[in-house]
Image (tube, coloured by chain):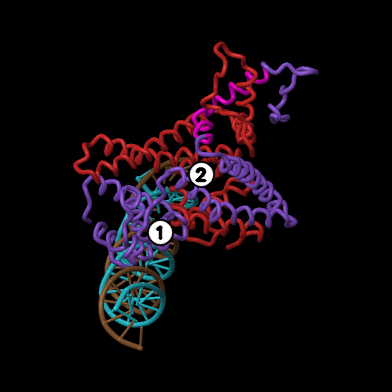
Chain colours: A red, B purple, C brown, D cyan
DNA sequence: CCGATATTTCAGAAAGTTCTGAAACGTAGG
DNA sequence: CCTACGTTTCAGAACTTTCTGAAATATCGG
């Protein structure tokens, strides 16, 4: 491996993290390397820097393309493929979220819906379905929230995340400020401010 | 495998999903089975239902315990260990988030902090550090948000997630409703709801 | 302390994945 | 339509993970 020490540390760490996760080590390393590189790299550059085989790099890049995580570029007068990650790290986060949803959440939701359609044939199955329904509803809530967040511009999203649970306070304030006909609006959903 | 069809579908699916993820197939299956079971199960029950070896179940249960994902129970006059998942699915989500943070996010943050302390020895390293700083700041924002969410009671959390980006609208409304001395408060960034 | 029952550990077998070098393939420019 | 250069594919080697049966360990009631 032929990298500045600081970069090497980073690359090795993401190789390990990749394994812990569904991604293989080389793929993690390639991505980490592209992420910190100032310039687009071609396959041969990656081979030299990581010290893995050409074919391994080829497969890794293919996988990263399948995940939409790298951009392919060309330089004038050079027909090699050059790769980069998006400049905007939020774009990377968005892509990751989107792809994971597609691969993990969506199929699970499909399965849950199918199974919930069926008639339980026993008291056991009845209980199992009940539990699956809870899971289904949870996933539905989370995906709806995600769909909502995804639409926001990054600046807004950051703003909202920074607020965190302070939003609660604002909701309470809103309820207090809004004097509504019949009064006591929001008594159910936004109960009185309590301790913290 | 000796399960009602509906349960079997579910268990097999989570076995697969587990593999896609860092968790091995058997562990995923055990958890899915415990999740949908009305009664606590002991190791032998699991062996019968999943058709895997006793030792495999033992290891799987150990791993689930290390993740804090199962509760151990005893029945009077029976010294076998019985296992369940929490009744409240949100508790499961919380545990998962907590453990993944501990195993994946925290070590990454530690590494990033260390690497960012070092003096860049070249222009390459300087750029790499810049990128790592972006990643560090992103993780910091997300973990702060998570720390905030974690403190909320489930009811509140659900409420907040259900609102989604509608919160934005409420923030705007708040800004409009609050006529403050000196006016134009909140024009820049939607400041925190101070004063209580 | 013993026997019965339950759980854990562990070495090796089985299964799965990652990685490589070699060969096949694709294409731009002459 | 050839050559040079670059990319992809693929069969098997290397490595890693998962799983099993057998043995070791733990614990309860008598």
Image-quadrant location for residue B79:
bottom left
Q: Residue at x 44, y 60 (%)?
A: B65
Q: Is residue A36 above or below residue C20?
A: above
Is residue B162 covered in magenta?
A: yes
> Foreground: B106 or B124?
B106
Q: Position of residue B26 (x, y in %)?
A: 34, 58
Q: Which residue bears the numbered disc 1?
A: B72
Q: Position of residue C6 (x, y in %)?
A: 32, 68
User: In the rendered view of the protein, which quadrant contains the C terminus of chain A?
Assistant: top right
Is residue B174 covered in magenta?
A: yes
SS for dot 2: strand
Residue furthest to the top? A181
User: In the rendered view of the protein, which quadrant contains the N terminus of chain A?
Assistant: bottom right
Residue furthest to the right? B182
> Foreground: A8 or C28?
A8
Q: Which mark is residue A79?
A: 2
**Residues in magenta?**
B156-176
Q: Residue at x 54, y 44 (%)?
A: A78
Q: Chain of mark 2?
A: A
Q: Residue at x 21, y 37 (%)?
A: A119
């Amino acid at each position: 491996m032929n990298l500045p020490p600081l970069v090497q540390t980073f690359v090795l760490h993401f190789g390990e993290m990749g394994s812990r996760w569904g991604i293989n080590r080389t793929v993690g390393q390639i991505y980490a390397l592209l992420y910190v590189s100032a310039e687009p790299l071609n396959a041969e550059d990656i081979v030299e820097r990581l010290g893995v085989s050409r074919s391994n790099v080829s497969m890794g890049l293919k996988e990263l393309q399948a995940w939409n995580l790298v951009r392919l570029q060309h330089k004038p007068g050079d027909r090699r493929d050059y790769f980069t990650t998006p400049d905007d790290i939020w774009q990377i986060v968005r892509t990751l979220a989107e792809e994971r949803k597609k691969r993990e959440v969506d199929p699970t939701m499909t399965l849950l819906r199918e199974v919930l359609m069926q008639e339980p044939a026993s008291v056991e199955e009845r209980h199992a379905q009940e539990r699956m329904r809870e899971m289904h509803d949870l996933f539905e809530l989370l995906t709806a929230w995600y769909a909502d967040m995804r639409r926001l511009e990054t600046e807004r999203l950051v703003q909202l995340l920074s607020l965190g649970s302070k939003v609660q306070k604002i909701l309470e304030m809103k309820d207090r400020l809004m004097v509504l006909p019949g009064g006591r609006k929001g008594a159910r959903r936004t109960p009185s401010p309590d301790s913290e």
